[in-house]
Amino acid sequence: MSDELKRLESLLQQRTAELESVKRELDGLGFSISHDLRAPLRAIIGFADLLRDGCADRLTPESKRHLDILCNQAQRLNDMIGSLLSYSRIGRQPMHLTRVDMKSLASESFTALSSQEQNRTFDFNLGDLPPAWGDRELLGVVWRNLIANAIKFTRQNPNPTIEVTGSAETASLVYHVRDNGVGFDPRYAERLFGMFQRLHPEGAFEGLGSGLAIAQRVINRHGGRIWAESSPGQGAVFHFSLAAPSTTESAASPVS
């Protein structure tokens, strides 16, 4: 029995090493592809803009419309490549673990994002959030993406409300971002966390559909979980959990 357990443990370690190797290769490949695609795309965008600026008075209205579509779609592709680079970078970025003041991080994220919204006033309710143990920069990405998501999807509501709460459970910390926006069909909740996945018609809301995928990758790197609940027209709530910091971790570093 002892020999069999040792064999299985060795096999598990081998498979884990293989999976880590494949993951690193895929991350490197994704970064290379995204980076190398940008050079010819920048040339397309640059020359299309030159054509539009230099020949606008000689183009028919239909030709102008076609050129505008070309420029807009090329820029959209450039933005999508940028999102892929961010997604890849988060998978490779070293993590600097410390005790993180999550309430401060959520407040900073809301202040920065809401200041960009002209003529909109939010009812922002921020509860007492338990501090976490993690990478402050990466956890800031999660808060920014979740709060940006709430700001975006409450755009049709004249009285937008965003509520951020959290609690410390036995072995984990759980945080929630709730809004009174348009909501979504809960049958497709898992699709939200795929790159470039959208549950609303294209053009109804801005964005590429990459923020939640990036947030999920950060949470996964912290050994946590992220999920969402909603009903159409009833708003949405996004939850994520992290392992509760141990007493040793909490005492080892000041809150950042």
Image: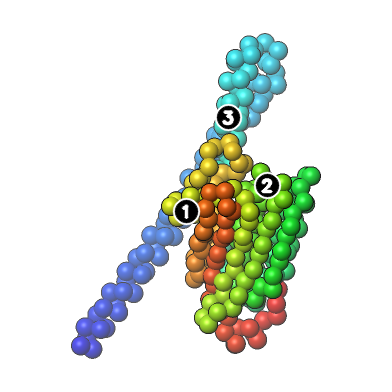
User: How far, Cα to Cα, is label 1 from label 2?
Assistant: 20 Å
On residue 44, the disc is 3
**Label 1 sits on residue:** 186
- N-terminal label among 3 and 1: 3
**Which mark's residue is nearer the viewer, 3 or 1?**
1
- In the image, residue 251 above or below residue 48: below
The numbered mark at residue 21 is none
Name the residue at 51% across, 45% down: 198
On-image quarter of the N terminus? bottom left
| Amino acid, disc 1 | Pro
Q: Amino acid at mark 3?
A: Ile
Q: Nearer the viewer, mark 3 or mark 2?
A: 2
CA gap between label 3 and label 1 equals 40 Å
Establish if 37 lies above or below 245.
above
Q: Nearer the viewer, residue 72 or 15?
A: 72
**Label 3, residues with CA under 10 Å away: few <14, some 14-19, many ≥20:** some
Q: Dot 2, how many residues are within 10 Å of its Cα: few (below 14), some (14-19), or many (20+)?
A: few
In terms of depth relative to the viewer, which is nearer, 127 or 110? 127
Helix, strand or loop at label 1? It is helix
Q: Earlier in the sequence, mark 1 or mark 2?
A: 2
Q: Which residue occupies 50% across, 45% down?
A: 199
- Whichever of labels 3 and 2 marks the residue nearer the N terminus, that label is 3
Residue at screen point 45% across, 55% down: 190
Can you say which quadrant of the picture contains the C terminus? bottom right
Judging by the rendered image, the residue that carries numbered circle 2 is: 157
